[in-house]
Amino acid sequence: MTFIVVDSALGWGEPNSPPLGGATVAFDPPGAGRVEQVTGADGKVTFTGIDWSKGKAAATAFLDGYALWSGVNLDEARLAKATRVDDAVALPLFAAAAPETVTVKGTLTGLMDAAHSVFVNVVNTNAGTEWIGPSAGTFTVSVPKGAPFMLQAAERSQAYLPSGQGEDMPIFQVLEQSVGATTADMTGVSRFRTWRPRAAARRRRDRRGRGRPPRGSPARPEKLRRRRRRRPW
């Protein structure tokens, strides 16, 4: 069984989570005593000779500057569903102190209705924040300093249901934008892609001469009749 200890700053076992070398992993195999190993530069350790017929196992990871992480009642079925990074079971460690962040500001364009509100979130990091406000406003979020991140924005409206027991919040557009690592505050502009319903797109194809019924189809009798006419000479 191979484990990989990763930094959870980018999220819980994200594929690009950085491995942590020098971490201690204590493994309690079924029916046997504890075994400890230290991760290499790739963040991995491998334990062999496990007899799963003897019960369940436990794993603990620790590294200075991070909170201790433990997983108990581990068996083959649970480990098969566990989050993996680089084909190894991920043991994510959370920094004991909050990571340093920078501020990202931006303006969203290409909205369908200026009366809608906008929701902006940093989706692939535990250190990110979210912002909700009017579509015409400038959003402000915090992201980890020196680490790549992804912004996700949604254009939506909001109204209370007639019953007063909830809210109706349809989403009209969604934008996802990957941003490289930054070590300083930054400001930018993000544009929603123009979205059209399928029916409208189909009509547009018809006007361009595409999407017509195939030859011989009953939907084109006039064209077929014209083609059957022969010139008198």
Image: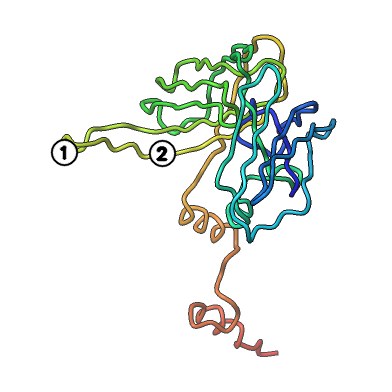
Residue at (26, 32) in percent of width and height? 159
Q: Residue 189 appears at what percent x and percent y?
A: 60, 21
The colouring scheme, among rainbow, by chain, secondary structure or one colour, is: rainbow
Q: Residue 136 appears at what percent x and percent y?
A: 44, 19
Task: Name the residue at the right extreme.
Answer: 41
In the picture of the structure, the residue carrying the numbered disc 2 is 171
Q: Is residue 33 above or below residue 185?
A: below
Q: Residue 56 appears at what percent x and percent y?
A: 59, 51
Task: Name the residue at the top extreme.
Answer: 184
Residue at (63, 61) in percent of width and height? 53
Q: CA distance from mark 1 to mark 2?
A: 19 Å
Q: Amino acid at mark 2?
A: Ile
Q: Is residue 4 above or below residue 214?
A: above
Between disc 1 and disc 2, whose residue precedes? 1
Q: Is residue 25 above or below residue 104?
A: below
Element type where label 1 sits in the image: loop
Q: Nearer the viewer, residue 34 or 85?
A: 34
Residue 42 lies in quadrant: top right
Mark 2 surroundings: few (<14), some (14-19) or many (≥20) residues within 10 A = some
Quarter of the image where the C terminus is located: bottom right
Element type where label 2 sits in the image: strand
Q: Nearer the viewer, residue 214 or 50?
A: 50
Mark 1 surroundings: few (<14), some (14-19) or many (≥20) residues within 10 A = few
Q: Is residue 107 left or right of residue 187?
A: left
Q: Amino acid at mark 1?
A: Pro
In the picture of the structure, the residue carrying the numbered disc 1 is 162
